[in-house]
Image (cartoon, grey):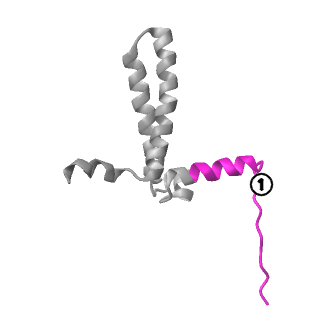
Amino acid sequence: MTNGRILFIFTPKSIILTVAGATIGFIFYYILKAILHKTLYGLIAVGICAFIGYSIGTFKMPETNSFEITRKTGGERIDDVILRAIKFKMKKNRIYVYTKEEK
């Protein structure tokens, strides 16, 4: 039973984003390997990018009033916030508000 315990920290979304981050890290790995001829720096880049992908898929925005973005998005998942910002930019910063009149 202890062999599978490490997999409980990964959700399917966090595994996908960790692999995506590691893939981006491997691009940096090959660039750094070609330029500096050092594999250690490339492996560090892979680890950092994989951790960034994992944290985007797992962590939530903190609930604090210090910054405007944390005040508006506190408690929501980071990937949901990023997707909403991308969709907002794709609509050219337009917000549509529909009101319903009550009788």
Which region shows up in magenta?
81-103
Choose between 101 and 17: the one closer to the eye.
17
Residues 92 and 24: in front is: 24
Amino acid at dot 1: Arg
- x, y percent for residue 67: 52, 50
Residue 63 in sight: yes
Viewer-proximal residue among 80 and 37: 37
Instruction: Look at the picture and state if 20 lies above or below 68.
Output: above
Q: Is 38 situated left or right of 4 in this image? A: right
Instruction: Tell me what residue is drawn at x 43 percent, y 9 percent.
Output: 37
Q: Position of residue 29 (x, y in %)?
A: 46, 21
Residue 25 part of the magenta-drawn span: no
Could one spot residue 67 in this view of the protein? no
Crowding at mark 1 (Cα within 10 Å: few <14, some 14-19, many 20+): few
Question: What residue is rendered at 26% in x and 51% in y?
Answer: 5
Which residue is pictured at 48% across the width and 16% down the height? 32
Residue 87 magenta-highlighted: yes
Q: Which residue is mark 1?
A: 94
Left or right of residue 83: residue 97: right
The answer to which of 50 and 101 lies nearer the viewer is: 50
* Tally of numbered tags: 1
x then y, percent, for residue 57: 47, 49
User: At numbered mark 1, what does the secondary structure look like: helix, strand or loop?
Assistant: loop
Q: Quadrant of the N terminus?
A: bottom left
